[in-house]
Image (cartoon, helix red, strand yellow):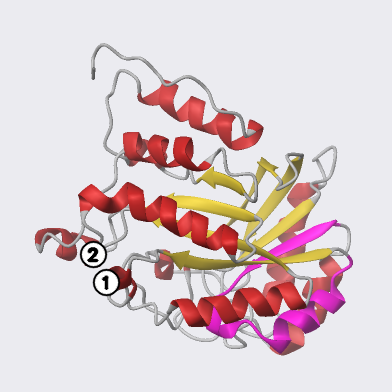
Amino acid sequence: MVDPWKAHGTVFEEERAPNGAVERVGTVFLAGAECPFTCSFCDLWRWTLEGPTPPGALPIQLGRALEAFRGEDPLPERLKLYNASNFFDRRAVPAEDVPRIAELAQPFRAVTVESHASMVGPEAVEFAALVSGTLEVAIGLETIHPGAMSHLNKRLDLARFDRAAAFLAEQHIDLRVFVLLGAPYVPPAESLEWTVRTVEYAASRGAGRIAVIPVRGGNGELERLQGLDAFAPPTLAQLEQALDHCLPMRTAAVTVDLWDVARLPSCDACRSGRIARLARMNVTGRTEPPISCTACA
C-alpha cells in the first residue's frame, strides 16, 4: 500500500547540463494518483494510489522530503519532482496544492516535473510563473518507430509531441525527453538504430536533456509480449552502444538511465566495469575506450 502522506524517497546525484556544466540534482519521488495512460512498458503504477491524490498530501510529502536536503552542502541546484504520473493532471496534483509546491521549491535554481505531452498547456505556464527558477518539463517520447508507437498504449503520436515541444519553447520552458531502448514491437535487430533516431528527433525538437531508458521487465505485460516475440529485453552492451552513438551530439545532453541497470543481461566478469564507465560518461560527456573483457570476447 502507498502512503499518500509520505514520499517514496529522495535521490541526490550529479547531472550534466546541455552546456556541459555539472549540476547538483535532488529528486523527490512523490506518491500520488495513477497515470491514466496505461503504457505497456510502464511499471510505475505500482508506486501510485488507487484513487485521486488527497488535497494537501503533496505539500506535506514534499516538505518532509526536503528535510533530507538540509545536510546537502551545497544545496542541489535542481529539484526534480517525479510523481509516477503527470504533474499537470489535477487528479494527480490538485490545483489547490500547486502554489504551496512552488513555494517549497523556491530555494532551487531549476525545477523539473514530468508530464504526458497531451497534458502540456496553460497549467505548465502557470507553474512556471510560480517557481522562482527555470521550469523544465520531462516528456516520454519513447520511440519514433511508427509500428511501435501505435502499440504502446501511450496514445501519443509525433504531431502531438511536436505541439507540446513547440508550446514549451514558445513559453521559454525547458524540455527533457525520455527515450526507450528495447521498446516493445521494435525488432531487436533494429532496437539500437531506432533509439538513436529517436534521440536525434527529440534533440531536433528542442530537447536540452535526453535520457535513454532501457526497458525492464517485471510488469507482467512485458512478459506476455516477450512470449509473443513482441519484446526482447535490451542488454547492457546495447545500452553502451546507445550512449557511444549519442554522446557526441552537441545539441543536447544525452545520458543513459542506470536505475536497476545491473538487471540487464550482461557478462558477470565485466558488468561492474561497464556500469562504472557509463556513469562517468553520463557526467563528463566525454567518450571513453570500450571495456575489454576476455570472458565475453
The answer to whether marks 2 and 1 mark residues whose Cβ atoms lie closer than 8 Å is yes
Q: Position of residue 59 (x, y in %)?
A: 74, 73
Q: Residue at x 49, y 69 (%)?
A: 2
Q: Residue at x 78, y 48 (%)?
A: 69
Quadrant hosting residue 228:
bottom left
Mark 2 and mark 1: span between their CA atoms? Answer: 7 Å
Q: Position of residue 113 (x, y in %)?
A: 66, 67
Q: Earlier in the sequence, mark 2 or mark 1?
A: 1
Look at the image and say whether residue 117 sits in the magenta stretch.
yes
Dot 2, how many residues are within 10 Å of its Cα: few (below 14), some (14-19), or many (20+)?
Answer: many
In this view, the residue in front, 82 or 18, is 18
Q: Which residues are magenta?
A: 108-132
Number of the label disc, if any, that sits on residue 147? 1
> In what element is the residue under mark 1?
helix
Question: Looking at the image, is mark 2 or mark 1 nearer the viewer?
Answer: 1
In this view, the residue in front, 215 or 159, is 159
Residue 244, compared with residue 101, is above or below; it is above
Dot 1, how many residues are within 10 Å of its Cα: few (below 14), some (14-19), or many (20+)?
Answer: few
Number of the label disc, if any, that sits on residue 225? none
